[in-house]
Amino acid sequence: MIFRTLLLAILLCPAALADVRQADESAGTLNFSAIQAGAKFTGFFKRFQVKLDFDPASPAKGSLDVTVESPSIETQDAERDEILKSPDFFWTEKHPQAIFHATDFERAGSGWRASGELTIRGVKKPIAVQFTLVPAGAVTVMKGTASLKRLAFGLGQGDWASTEWIGDDVDVRFELKLTPIG
C-alpha cells in the first residue's frame, strides 16, 4: 500500500518535483553510524546544504549537490568528536567540507539511486545514494541512505588505520524537507 501511494504521488505530481529544491540543517537531518570497540555509535552533522535539481520525468537532466561542514560533526562524545576533527580523521582545519555531486539517476525499487562522487579529505571516490521523494504540500520530503568505507577516504590515519577499534563501514541516513529555491 505504501509503495502504491508513493508511486501515485510521484506519477501524479512530477511537476511538483521538477523545481530546483534545497534544504539545510534547519530542514532536516544528516546522520551516520559506525562501530567502535564492537558497539554501534551514531552521530550527525550540524551544518550542511543540499540542492536537488531533479524531475522524475527526466532523470538524466538531474543533479544532486551536498556540502557538509566537517567541523560540525557531533557524536555526543567530546573526546571522540575532537579525534574525528583531527588530522587522523576529517582534518577539519585543512578540509573543512565534504562534498557529494551526482548527475546519474536511475530507478531503484520504489525510489531512486543517485550515483556520483564524494570528496572527503581531498579524496574523491564514487558512491551511490538511495532515496525517495514524497511531495508534501510546498515541500518535498527526501529520505535516503548511503554506505561508505571510511578507510577509502583516509578517515583513520596512524593507529586508527586499523579496523581493530573502529570498523571500516559507515552508514549514512538523511531526511530532508526540500523547498523550492527562489
Image (cartoon, helix red, strand yellow):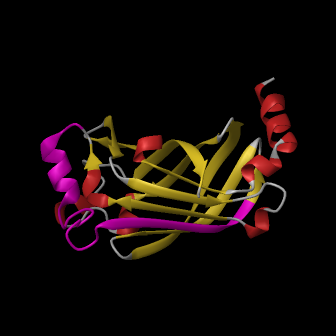
Image coords of residue 138 (percent x, y): 65, 40
Residue 28 in sight from this viewpoint: no
Which image quadrant for residue 56?
bottom right
For residue 147, above or below residue 86: above
Vertical arrangement, residue 122 with respect to residue 114, above or below = below
Residue 49: x and y in percent read 45, 57
The answer to whether residue 17 is magenta is no
Question: Splitting the image into 4 quarters, where does residue 141 fall?
Answer: top right
Residue sticking out furthest to the front: 182
Residue 106 sits above or below residue 102 on the image: above
Q: Is any part of residue 117 visible from this angle?
A: yes
In the displayed structure, would residue 100 be above or below residue 48?
A: below
Q: Determine the residue positioned at 78% across, 68% down.
A: 60
Magenta span includes 93: yes
Magenta-highlighted residues: 76-105
Left or right side of 156 for 16: right
Q: Residue furthest left?
A: 79
Q: In screen coordinates, is 137 left or right of 100? A: right
Q: Give the residue displayed 77% in from the left and 62% down from the top.
A: 59
Q: Which of 26 and 156 is in front in this view?
A: 26
Q: In this image, 164 relative to 148: left or right?
A: left
